[in-house]
Image: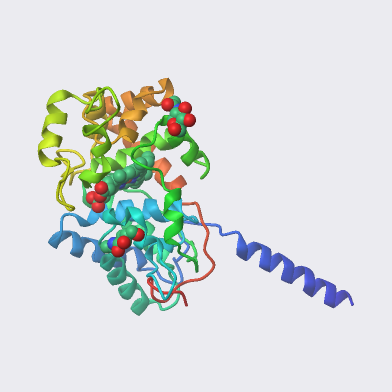
Amino acid sequence: MAIMSTLLISLLILSFSSSSTSLSSNYYAKTCPNVESLVRKAVRDAATSDKKVPAALLRMHFHDCFIRGCDASVLLDSKGNNKAEKDGPPNVSLHAFYVIDDAKKAVESACPGIVSCADVLALAARDSVVLSGGPSWDVPKGRKDGRTSLASETIQLPFPTFNISQLQQSFAKRGLSLEDLVALSGGHTLGFSHCSSFKNRIHNFNSKTGVDPSISPSFAAGLKKICPVNSAKNAGVPMDPSSTSFDNKYYKLIFQQKALFSSDKALLDMTKTKNLAANFASSKDAFTKAFIKSMIKMSSITGGQEVRKNCRVVN
Ligand code: HEM
Ligand SMILES: *[C@@H]1O[C@H](CO)[C@@H](O)[C@H](O)[C@H]1NC(C)=O
Ligand SMILES: *[C@@H]1O[C@H](CO)[C@@H](O)[C@H](O)[C@H]1NC(C)=O
């Protein structure tokens, strides 16, 4: 009887501790010591032939973490009747999934069945920042991969039309603060935006004016030229003029009324977020420190259960 109840208690403790994932920097030190260099090589190789890769991987990680936690749900392919996240409405911006496949393949041949796809993606996002001239940091590891990915859940992502209170709410739901919101929005120093993401600001803004009055007129004129009412589906602009280099220019631009999205401009609509943005605009170092802290926080939202063999399908 005593043995039985001890066994039962041990089992209970075991199942409880395995469902709450705890992350650590040296998680794979014994089981897959080369994981970091294998992922870094795959990301570096891909970025060498395609400069758009780092931005894609940073955004992919953000999308992953905001839906069901960082559980690689964003990597699953649609199957049968199930339409996956990557085929949901904001999919136009997600690309370069092949880089994660390559990294995972390399990791699987070195240490099969050990490293989760969610960890591979978190490492790839950090490596993307480093490759773009940004800071490096230790990525906590030990995430598990989820078994569910639903296109219908992508509406839980923040929209580029969001105002500051909607952004605050979206981040707070994930345990992220206003400081995290301002620091992580700095990810928009990298990459490309399609016209569809900001056309609300340059055509039929409201009943009084066609163009958002908070956009610099010369900047708005340039955007309208590239993005007329019926612009091509793939038309768009770089997120900032130095869109392959990770810097704090994004914050300078929003103060020059050259923010691309309403959600970028919205950071100036609340005293607290405006002060943070001003601090990041004037100090690259302050931005860098805050970005690292918030990336670690965002990438530590966990959610999965297994270590997927192939990032595109559940085991
Ligand atoms: C605050 C809420 C956010 C909103 C509303 C938002 C919205 C968007 C939109 C609409 C695009 C352009 C998609 C397109 O037209 O192709 C974009 C691109 C991008 N976002 Fe965000 N985003 C947010 C936060 C973040 C965060 C937290 C990160 C990462 C730390 C991030 C990183 C990126 C990157 C790197 C791109 C460029 C992607 C590429 O070039 O492939 N964003 N975002
Ligand atoms: C993106 O999502 C839309 C709407 O759900 C879908 O019709 C389209 O096929 C998807 N595109 C890609 C490239 O996956
Ligand atoms: C933001 O938008 C929501 C929904 O449209 C609205 O209820 C709220 O009042 C707006 N907040 C601000 C600060 O504009």
Note whether 39 is above or below 309 in the view shown: above
Give the colouring mode of the picture: rainbow
Front residue of 137/308: it is 308
| x 37%, y 42%: residue | 159
Q: Residue at x 31, y 66 (%)?
A: 100
Farthest top residue? 271
Residue toward you, 57 or 224:
224
| x, y percent for residue 149 | 45, 64
**Quadrant in which residue 110 is drawn:** bottom left
Q: Percent x, y for residue 10? A: 74, 70
The picture quadrant for ligand 2 comes to: bottom left
Residue positioned most to the front: 207
Left or right, residue 6 beside residue 286:
right
Q: Of 101 and 111, which appears nearest the observer?
A: 101
Q: Residue at x 45, y 35 (%)?
A: 166
- Judged left or right of residue 133, residue 299 is right
Residue 126 seen from this side? no
Percent across and percent down for residue 14 are 68, 68
- Which quarter of the figure is the N terminus placed in? bottom right
- In the rendered image, residue 155, in percent from the top left (x then y), is placed at 43, 50
Q: Is residue 189 left or right of residue 126?
A: left
Note whether 8 is above or below 212 in the view shown: below
Q: State whether residue 277 appears in this view.
A: yes
* Picture residue at 31% right of the left edge, 33% below the top: 262
